[in-house]
Image (cartoon, rainbow, N blue to C red):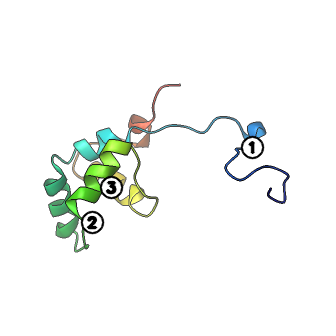
Amino acid sequence: MTKSGRRRGQRNRAAGKLPEWKYSELIASFGTANQLADRLRQEGLDAPPRITILGWRQRNSIPGRWAPLLIQLAMWDGNLNGIGQLRKNP
């Protein structure tokens, strides 16, 4: 139990449902996992391994430290007009 009386992993129901995102589509907008890694290297970053990028796509989940960067790169590349495009319809 946490200090709030909830079990670990339970969401605060009063907070409402959190939005869901189409991260797989964001990743696909860069092409293959290798193309995404190349794009990250163009920005001077150490790209994660190809298998890691494939895992993100399969799980539709991007680590928080990478998500803002990928969103910004997709916007710069003209593949995304705004974050609203990534939101799944309720």
Vertical position of residue 41 compared to residue 34: above or below: below
- In percent of the image, x 44 and y 37: which residue is there? 84
Percent from the top left, x then y, of residue 75? 30, 49
Horizontal arrangement in the rendering, residue 11 relative to residue 74 (left or right):
right
Percent from the top left, x then y, of residue 41? 19, 69
For the residue pair 75 and 34, the one nearer the viewer reads as 34
- In percent of the image, x 23 and y 42: which residue is there? 28
Mark 1 residue crowding within 10 angstroms, few (<14) / some (14–19) / many (20+): few
For the residue pair 86 and 3, the one nearer the viewer reads as 3
Within the image, what quadrant is residue 35 found in?
bottom left
- Mark 2 lies on residue: 48
Query: Which circle's residue, 2 or 1, is located before the other in the chain?
Result: 1
Query: Which circle's residue, 1 or 3, is located before the other in the chain?
Result: 1
Horizontal arrangement in the rendering, residue 76 relative to residue 32 (left or right):
right
Marks 2 and 1 sit apart, C-alpha to C-alpha, by 33 Å
For the residue pair 35 and 77, the one nearer the viewer reads as 35
Q: What's under tag 3, amino acid-wise?
A: Leu
Does the residue at mark 2 contact the one at mark 1 (Cβ under 8 Å)? no
- Mark 3 lies on residue: 70
Marks 3 and 2 sit apart, C-alpha to C-alpha, by 13 Å
Horizontal arrangement in the rendering, residue 64 relative to residue 38 (left or right):
right
**In the structure shown, which secondary structural element does the residue marked by tag 2 occupy?**
loop
- In percent of the image, x 42 and y 43: which residue is there? 83
Mark in the foreground, 1 or 3: 1
For the residue pair 53 and 86, the one nearer the viewer reads as 53
- Mark 1 lies on residue: 12
